[in-house]
Amino acid sequence: MLVGEAIAMRTGSEPTTARSALRMRLWLSLWGLAWAVFGLTAFTLTGRPGWAAVCGVLLVLVLVDLAVIIHRIHQGPRYQPGRTVPPHEPSHGGRRYGH
């Protein structure tokens, strides 16, 4: 980094203005679910147990991801962590990343 280079600092307002792409993640996970089920079925029927196992593992990962996405969607747009989670501390103009 150059000495005179300007750094865009966080203002601390990002958590209130940030938007999550949960709906897009939901549709991409559903697409992955369809392909994992198709692959698992196709490889099982054609007698390729190795590839069927890979698709089975992928299917489990997609299902876990879907569960997390649906849980976060149901938390709502105004969800805030509990009192044990400290708020975001904005930068005070010091060095970044401990350098």
Image (cartoon, helix red, strand yellow):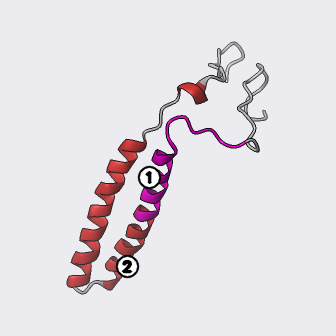
Looking at the image, which residue is at 44% across and 52% down?
70
Q: Nearer the viewer, residue 17 or 28?
A: 17
Q: Quadrant of residue 8?
A: top right
Look at mark 2 in the image and give the residue it sits on: 53
Residue 25 % position (x, y): 39, 47
Magenta region includes residue 50: no
Question: Is 7 above or below relative to 38?
Answer: above
The quadrant in which the N terminus is found is top right
Residue 30 % position (x, y): 32, 56
Judged from the image, the secondary structure of the residue bearing numbered disc 2 is: helix
Using the numbered discs, state the Cα–Cα distance from disc 2 to disc 1 in whole angstroms. Answer: 26 Å
Part of the protein shown in magenta: 63-82
Q: Nearer the viewer, residue 72 or 48?
A: 72
The quadrant in which the C terminus is found is top right
Looking at the image, which residue is at 32% across and 62% down?
33
Residue 22 % position (x, y): 43, 43
Look at mark 1 in the image and give the residue it sits on: 70
Question: Is 59 above or below relative to 70?
Answer: below
Q: Residue furthest bottom?
A: 47
Under mark 1, the amino acid is Ile
Looking at the image, which residue is at 40% across and 68% down?
58
What label does residue 96 carry, if any?
A: none
Magenta region includes residue 75: yes
Prevailing secondary structure of the magenta residues? helix
Judged from the image, the secondary structure of the residue bearing numbered disc 1 is: helix
Looking at the image, which residue is at 50% across and 48% down?
72
Under mark 2, the amino acid is Ala
Left or right of 69? Residue 55 is left
Left or right of 93? Residue 67 is left
Q: Quadrant of residue 60?
A: bottom left
Left or right of 46? Residue 13 is right
